[in-house]
Image (cartoon, coloured by chain):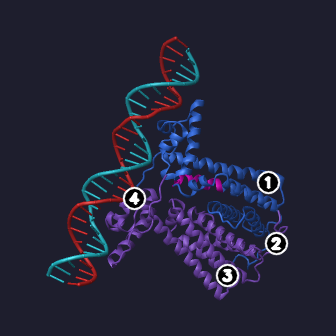
Chain colours: A blue, B purple, C red, D cyan
DNA sequence: TGCCAATGTGAGCTTTTCCTCATATTATTA
DNA sequence: TAATAATATGAGGAAAAGCTCACATTGGCA
């Protein structure tokens, strides 16, 4: 059974030179993992691509897994930051609901589109450690609270259980975009998809209950 | 760069004995991949768990990847079969739309629930070859056609672009269920989630357009 | 300038994994 | 029952990947 080896960066770069090294290593790792996949993306290759020696790599990352984790964390942060920023803007500006929804869906789409291969490798192929999931979970929870507040500020939003609605919104759009990017469907245009997803979200949020309430 | 090695089963088992061996190997592989992950799930361990020698394993699977592919194909088929069956039933019985939707969501949930770890390993961690994606794509396309027909038979369904709606339905429910199973959210009950997803689908399908048509 | 800490190097050790093959056992057929 | 095909075995070869460490270089500072 794999025992828990340290995943934290081994030492912090203190000089400018080493900060550049770390940056180069992370960028190289992204490229190498994309090109070869995680398993075949060897640390030797990463070091070579970064133009440094393997030894340097292991000065800052105690093992290959920690390199993966650093990359995954970085890209997760990027995603959450984007959403938080949009959320902030929307809370202040209060654009009409459909506009607001569209912005979120578009943002998520662009996020995935800017490096589909990397997203696939990181989140669909590489074995991320549990610590990553924990972190993701808490970040998602924070985000959810803010989304609930935002939704609550729209009078036309009719759904009862806002936390649940927020979860469904985020996860279904995320899942949809994710699979669309990974396995693009020739017959469906991105714009077309975005428009329709926004429709769905809007109808869901604003319709009066179309079934016999919640029960059965 | 990894060159394309054969992924097809090496030879077909002809006697009862060898059919049992192959079955044992596949079952063992599922267990071992679950417990250790794909990378650490070595072929030696699979053979040991199956109670056969590595040599026997390599009689039927030319390499580790082909074992993964066989497993993934098996479980993909299982999923598609379930949906096709449901689709067939629904086409004949024509249950009310909400009932029909609920059955699908529940079925998908149960499917993921019956072995969450294996699903995660196969579809979120292991590096599946392109041939798998191709197969999945065509199966999904076939399924989509049937869903379109089924949806078209409900008068209350208002959406214009049925193929698009069918894609959105399948992918968003799949994504939602998938992430719910992999990272369960303590505060959300499965039943609660199912009910709400059905709501969303139903509202999406039956509402008149709530935005300014499709444009912008 | 000289000293020490920070940083960088890369040959090669260690470990592991996939997979083969010569051999043995079991089933089938004549 | 003898002969042949199918199946099973598992020690060990080959290849590769992760990672170390003794040594070299660079930068900051007294």
Q: Chain of mark 3?
A: B
Both marks 4 and 2 on one chain: yes
What percent of the width, then of the height, locates residue A195?
77, 64
Q: Quadrant of the C terminus of chain A?
A: bottom right
Q: Chain of mark 1?
A: A
Residue A177 belongs to magenta span: no
Q: Quadrant of residue B26?
A: bottom left
According to the picture, the residue beneath numbered tag 1 turns out to be: A90
For the residues bearing labels 4 and 1, Cβ distance under 8 angstroms: no
Q: Is residue A178 visible?
A: yes
Residue B99's tag is 3
According to the picture, the residue beneath numbered tag 4 turns out to be: B42
Residue under the point 54% across and 52% down: A131
Both marks 3 and 2 on one chain: yes
Q: Which residues are drawn in magenta?
A: A127-140
Residue A125's tag is none
Q: Quadrant of the N terminus of chain A?
A: bottom left
Q: Earlier in the sequence, mark 4 or mark 2?
A: 4
Structural distance between the alpha carbons of marks 1 and 2: 24 Å
What percent of the width, then of the height, locates residue D12?
26, 53
Residue under the point 69% across and 68% down: A187
What percent of the width, then of the height, locates residue A184?
65, 63
Residue under the point 74% across and 78% down: A211
Q: Is residue B29 above or below residue A84?
A: below
Secondary structure of the residue carrying numbered label 4? loop
Q: Residues within 10 Å of mark 4 (few under 14, many from 20)?
A: some
Image depth: mark 4 or mark 1 in front: 4
Structural distance between the alpha carbons of marks 3 and 2: 23 Å
According to the picture, the residue beneath numbered tag 2 turns out to be: B209
């Amino acid at each position: 059974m794999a025992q828990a080896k340290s995943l934290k960066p081994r030492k912090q770069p203190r000089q400018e030179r080493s900060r550049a090294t770390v940056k180069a290593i992370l960028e190289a790792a992204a490229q190498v993992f994309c090109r070869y996949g995680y398993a075949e993306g060897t640390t030797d290759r990463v070091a070579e691509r970064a133009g440094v020696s393997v030894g340097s790599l292991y000065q800052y990352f105690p093992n290959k897994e920690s390199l993966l984790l650093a990359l995954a964390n970085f890209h997760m942060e990027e995603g959450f930051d984007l959403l938080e920023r949009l959320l902030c803007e929307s809370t202040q500006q209060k654009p009409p609901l459909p506009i607001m929804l569209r912005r979120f869906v578009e943002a998520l789409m662009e996020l995935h589109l800017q490096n589909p291969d990397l997203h696939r490798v990181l989140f669909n192929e590489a074995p991320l450690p549990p610590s990553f999931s924990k972190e993701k979970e808490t970040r998602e929870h924070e985000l959810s609270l803010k989304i609930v507040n935002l939704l609550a500020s729209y009078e036309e939003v009719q759904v009862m259980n806002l936390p649940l609605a927020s979860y469904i919104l985020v996860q279904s759009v995320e899942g949809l975009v994710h699979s669309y990017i990974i396995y693009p469907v020739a017959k469906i245009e991105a714009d077309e998809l975005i428009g329709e997803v926004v429709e769905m979200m809007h109808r869901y949020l604003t319709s009066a209950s179309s079934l016999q309430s919640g029960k059965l």
